[in-house]
């Protein structure tokens, strides 16, 4: 572990963390920010991403020593809470941050070639909280990847990574620029396209009971404001809805996604 004390928020070594740079939200020049002990650990363990440095307070360092022992080439910047706050420009860091390198974007081909039983497709989901929550659910329920339609929030947005509890750094994902045409490639790889919508003609609970659960599913989730787009609904093999009590027509995106992923998972 290579510890380097930092006493001044203006230190050039903290450029990746500076307020208004990558720490302001998304990633800049291929650099993103992970915050909190769980997420920093996820970055240190990630295969697709590489940590450039870690910025911690003395109190936070104590809880990360074991993970950092195996990362001797990564500089660990040790700073006071005041220096850390002044550097990053916000208070929610839990005394622990890391700068990561984004690396090359994943590919649709690689994700479907692994033949997972469950994929998630995000259709213009712009809110980082929702993107992070979906990645967390995808990891929890065994989805093999997340595919991103144009207009979807960057998963490496700082808040998305934090809400995902590091799942963004573990679950493969890829962009789908030719949208929605690339759904045809997903279908050709053996996946049933299932769109989650309040207008669905099939209840989600019927899958695996009254109706057989498809062998491989690509679950399409739209934004809370507009839902799955009309062209995508027309292209879907199934349009499913979640049964709810009378007078209730929707759930928030994170809750709906978790319910659907739980129902569509195939244990084992």
Image (cartoon, rainbow, N blue to C red):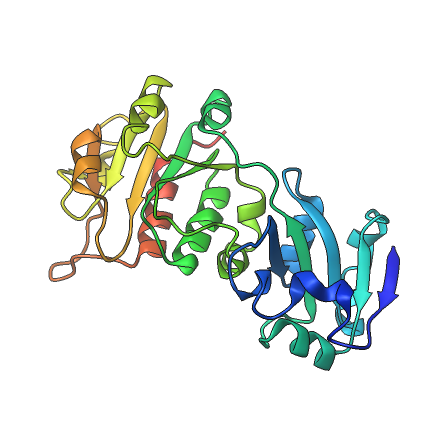
Whether residue 46 sits left or right of residue 256 in the image: it is right
Examine the rendered structure and indicate whether residue 255 appears above or below residue 222: below
Q: Is residue 158 left or right of residue 233?
A: right
Q: Position of 126 compared to 78: left or right? A: left
Q: Which quadrant holds the N terminus?
A: bottom right
Using the rendered view, name the quadrant where residue 188 is placed. top left
Image coords of residue 44 (percent x, y): 71, 48
Front residue of this view, candidates 54 and 144? 54
Q: Count how many numbered circles sit on residues in the image.
A: 0
At horizontal 50% and vertical 56% (from top left) the residue drawn is: 157
Q: Residue furthest bottom?
A: 82
In this view of the protein, can residue 42 be seen by the observer?
no
Q: Position of residue 109 (x, y in %)?
A: 46, 23
Q: Position of residue 175 (x, y in %)?
A: 43, 37
Residue 43 appearing in the image: yes
- Which quadrant would residue 244 be assigned to in this image? bottom left
**In the picture provided, is 52 more to the left or to the right than 108?**
right
The percent coordinates of residue 82 (x first, y second) are: 71, 82
Which residue is located at x 22 percent, y 47 percent? 242
Which sits in the foreground, 48 or 194? 48
Q: Is residue 139 above or below residue 189?
A: below
Q: Does 21 appear above or below 178? A: below
- Which residue occupies the foreground of this view, 209 or 50? 50
């Amino acid at each position: 572990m290579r510890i380097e004390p930092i006493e001044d928020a203006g230190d050039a070594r903290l450029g990746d963390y500076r307020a208004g740079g990558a720490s302001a939200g998304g990633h800049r020049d291929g650099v993103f920010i992970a915050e909190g002990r769980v997420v920093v650990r996820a970055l240190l363990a990630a295969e697709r991403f590489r940590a450039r440095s870690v910025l911690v307070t003395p109190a936070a360092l104590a809880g990360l020593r074991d993970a950092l022992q195996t990362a001797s080439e990564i500089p660990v910047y040790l700073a006071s809470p005041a220096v850390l706050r002044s550097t990053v420009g916000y208070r929610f860091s839990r005394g622990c941050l890391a700068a990561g390198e984004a690396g090359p974007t994943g590919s649709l081909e690689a994700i479907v070639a692994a033949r997972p039983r469950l994929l998630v497709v995000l259709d213009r989901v712009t809110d980082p909280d929702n993107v992070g929550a979906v990645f967390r659910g995808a990891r929890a329920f065994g989805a093999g990847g997340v595919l991103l339609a144009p207009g979807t929030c960057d998963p490496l947005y700082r808040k998305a990574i934090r809400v995902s509890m590091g799942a963004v750094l573990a679950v493969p994902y890829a962009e789908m620029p030719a949208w929605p045409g690339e759904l045809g490639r997903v279908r050709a790889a053996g996946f049933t396209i299932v769109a989650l919508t309040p207008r669905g003609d099939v209840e989600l609970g019927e899958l695996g009971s009254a109706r057989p659960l498809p062998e491989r599913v690509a679950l399409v989730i739209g934004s809370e404001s507009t839902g799955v787009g009309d062209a995508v609904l027309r292209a879907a093999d199934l349009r499913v809805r979640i049964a709810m009590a009378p007078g209730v027509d929707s759930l928030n995106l994170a809750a709906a996604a978790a319910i659907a992923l739980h129902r569509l998972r195939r244990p084992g």
